[in-house]
Image: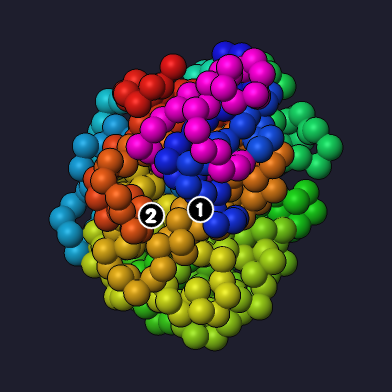
């Protein structure tokens, strides 16, 4: 395509500033160089803008590319969540382990499948919990990128050395990534055939990570400035395990032969973990379904480094207690959105998560929901200076939605309520998918 590229739509939602009617987003060398309103024809002879590519999407809305702050793409081949609604976490983990052992698909292919699905749903940035066989060398030329959090599991003290070896290999990979100034994310050209990713570290959860490992990786996170993601305050079973050292998760650990009482000698509740995690560089508290008031206060006070990732449809799949979303937002916590994996959500559509939130929290302003799925999620991943809103100098990551022709008072409300299709996804100034060429798309 020529450079620059002018994209016009009836509405543009920059997120960091008010929506624009008849908005034009100008892209040059993969970055956003202008966001403005423009009446009249967009084409070169009439616009006085000179040469370039002109695309008028007509009745459509341009939004920043969506940011899925938490998923596990290794399960992208699953066609339905595991178990039945309301399944207990320990029971679900048993079924997940079985699924992992028995399914034929290779995990690399599943990751690639998940990246492709994400793109088709307008997701351009991902917080991925990555396995050791993450396909670094086989990633498609252009697909979403983001932060790959290497997963670490060590339920007992005996497992800590092996997990530490893995943590150190992640640290090495982080160091091997090319850096451009202090910018954490790079154009594909810089990394050869692979899209740009950065490294994170994910001590899995309180029931699967010995505090000895957790403390060691928190130190790595702080020293090497590597973001950390941990599932926390996810289920009542986790709270019971921490408070009483009993319940279905203890039974599961015993059954697997990995129960180590020393893992639970000190921590009694998620707050103990939050206090430990306060020393890390940047932390994504994944789920936080059962966060208490004092824990929310701590997260708000340390909002410079903590974010909470709400996974709405996964939360609903397990039928957890009411999610403290309004409390978190009112306290000033940075709340991001994630799909979690297809093992507990029907698909990888972040827009479906946003629509779910709109339906279940009708008092929440639509702008807040849009922010959670874009800028807040980007902030959680430490990428908000590079993406997450349509602002000058940020990567041109965009999603274009088809909108109805008739006049509407609140278009954003319509996007979040209706099943409007994704028309196109743009990643770093390149059009990756386009489901339709209507409305003068040239
Ligand atoms: Zn997860």
Q: Residue 118's x, y, as percent?
A: 40, 35
Q: Quadrant of the N terminus?
A: top right
Q: Name the residue under label 1.
A: 19
Question: What residue is shown at x 57% (from left), y 22% (from top)?
Answer: 46
The answer to whether residue 326 is visible is: yes
User: Would residue 153 appear left or right of 80 to someone viewing this image?
Assistant: right
Residue 322 on the magenta span: no
Q: In which quarter of the image is residue 419?
A: top left
Question: What residue is shown at x 45% (from left), y 56% (from top)?
Answer: 370
Q: What stretch is highlighted in magenta?
A: 35-64
Q: Residue 348's x, y, as percent?
A: 35, 42
CA neighbours of label 2 inside 10 A, class few (<14), some (14 to 19), many (20+): many
CA neighbours of label 1 inside 10 A, class few (<14), some (14 to 19), many (20+): many
Above or below 116: residue 324: below
Q: Are marks 2 and 1 in contact (CB under 8 Å)?
A: yes
Which sits in the foreground, 289 or 208? 289
Above or below 111: residue 311: below
Question: What residue is shown at x 66% (from left), y 78% (from top)?
Answer: 301
Foreground mark, 2 or 1, reads 1
Q: Residue 412 carries which label?
A: 2
Q: Residue 214's x, y, as percent?
A: 62, 60
Residue 62 on the magenta span: yes
């Amino acid at each position: 395509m020529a450079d620059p590229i002018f994209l016009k739509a009836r509405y543009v939602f920059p997120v960091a500033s008010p929506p624009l009617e008849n908005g034009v987003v100008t892209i040059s060398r993969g970055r956003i160089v202008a966001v403005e309103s423009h009446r009249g024809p967009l084409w070169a002879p009439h616009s006085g803008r000179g040469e370039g590519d002109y695309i008028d999407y007509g009745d459509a809305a341009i939004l920043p590319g969506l940011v899925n702050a938490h998923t596990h793409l290794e399960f992208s081949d699953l066609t339905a969540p595991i178990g039945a609604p309301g399944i207990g976490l320990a029971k679900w983990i048993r079924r997940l382990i079985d699924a992992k052992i028995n399914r034929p698909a290779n995990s690399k292919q599943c990751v690639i499948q998940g990246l492709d699905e994400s793109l088709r749903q307008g997701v351009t940035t991902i917080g991925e919990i990555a396995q050791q066989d993450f396909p670094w060398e086989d990633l498609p030329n252009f697909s979403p990128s983001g932060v790959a959090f290497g997963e670490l599991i060590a339920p007992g003290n005996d497992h800590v050395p092996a997990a530490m070896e893995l943590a150190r290999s992640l640290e090495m990979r982080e160091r091997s990534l090319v850096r451009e100034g202090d910018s954490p994310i790079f154009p594909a050209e810089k990394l050869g055939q692979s899209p740009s990713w950065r490294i994170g570290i994910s001590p899995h959860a309180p029931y699967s990570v010995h505090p000895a490992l957790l403390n060691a990786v928190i130190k790595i996170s702080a020293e090497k400035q590597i973001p950390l993601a941990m599932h926390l305050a996810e289920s009542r079973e986790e709270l019971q395990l921490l408070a009483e050292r009993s319940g279905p998760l203890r039974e599961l650990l015993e059954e697997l032969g990995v129960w180590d009482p020393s893992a639970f000698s000190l921590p009694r509740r998620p707050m103990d973990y939050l206090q430990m995690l306060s020393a890390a560089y940047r932390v994504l508290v994944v789920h936080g379904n059962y966060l208490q008031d004092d824990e929310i206060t701590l997260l708000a006070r340390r909002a410079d480094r903590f974010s909470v990732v709400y996974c709405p449809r996964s939360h609903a799949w397990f039928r957890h207690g009411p999610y403290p979303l309004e409390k978190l937002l009112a306290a000033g916590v940075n709340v991001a959105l994630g799909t979690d994996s297809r093992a507990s959500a029907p698909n990888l559509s972040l827009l479906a998560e946003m629509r779910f939130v709109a339906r279940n929290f009708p008092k929440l302003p639509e702008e807040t929901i849009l922010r959670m799925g874009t800028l807040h999620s980007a902030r959680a991943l430490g990428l908000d200076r590079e993406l997450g809103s349509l602002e000058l100098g940020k990567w041109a990551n965009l999603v274009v939605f088809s909108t109805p022709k008739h006049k509407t008072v609140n278009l954003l409300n319509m996007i979040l309520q209706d099943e409007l299709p994704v028309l196109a996804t743009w990643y770093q100034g390149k059009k990756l998918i386009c489901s339709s060429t209507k409305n003068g798309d040239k």
